[in-house]
Image (tube, rainbow, N blue to C red):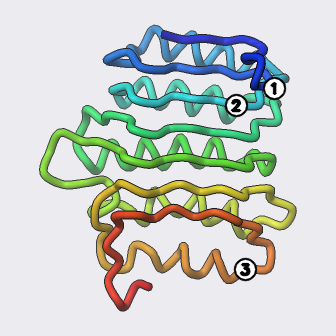
Amino acid sequence: KIHAGAGSQFEAAPAVQCLGGERLIDADAAVLSHIVRASSEIRKLVICSVACTDKALQLVADGLGATSAPITELDLSRLGHMESIATASHRLASLLRAACIHTTLASIDVREQQHNSSGTLFSICGEEILTPLCDLMCCKGNMLRVLKLGGNSAWGLGVSAPLSEALAFSSCVLEELDISGSALANTDA
């Protein structure tokens, strides 16, 4: 279910939300992409707790990359990925690259990415997913204060290296970082 509107009484900024259903089908993703692309007022984009195809994520990425809206919050938590881990990781990274061109982002949530295989996105392709987030953190004038990556199981060896480097940049203004459950190796910490 897609909801686009001025937000609830608790949300002052316009928001687009896709919550709860079983799947974000390609047709709905195309509508969502159009809404995001056409609006200059959206501050919050929530797509969580749904299964997504590769094409659906690409459509959303296209909308994010083309919008002039000053998006401040992106919630992609608990997405169910239906393609191979490599394809799903690549598409999630592509969506994050499109989102991270918006230095107005103050909060990004990519917790609990789900895949129906035995592997996890962060254990196999985590560095690809982290790269656009780290690039944003290193960008002068970025507003990213909250980054939630927890619940993605153990990360592969070396995956956290770009994150460690980005945290050391003077442009990094992060105040909250959730990497719970990542089981970072001592050499990664």
2 or 1: tag closer to the N-terminus: 1
Report the Cα–Cα distance between label 2 and label 1: 7 Å
**Secondary structure state at the residue bearing disc 2:** strand
Give the label on residue 170, or none: none
Of all residues shown, which one is farthest toward the bottom? 187
Mark 2 and mark 1 in contact? Answer it, CB < 8 Å: yes
- Residue 128 percent across, percent down from the top left: 44, 60
Say which of 4 and 162 sits in front: 4
**Rendered position, 66 above or below 85:** above
**Rendered position, 138 above or below 67:** below
Q: For the residue marked with disc 2, what is the amino acid?
A: Lys
> Residue drawn 61% across and 48% down?
108
**Rendered position, 52 above or below 85:** above
Residue 50: which quarter of the image? Answer: top left
Report the Cα–Cα distance between label 2 and label 3: 26 Å
Name the residue that disc number 2 marks: 44
Q: For the residue marked with disc 1, what is the amino acid?
A: Ala
- Residue 106 percent across, percent down from the top left: 74, 50
Say which of 189 and 97 sits in front: 189
Give the label on residue 169, or none: 3
**Secondary structure state at the residue bearing disc 1:** loop
Name the residue that disc number 1 marks: 13
> Residue drawn 64% across and 29% down?
45
**Secondary structure state at the residue bearing disc 3:** loop
Say which of 177 and 105 sits in front: 177
Horizontal arrangement in the rendering, residue 30 relative to residue 38 (left or right): left
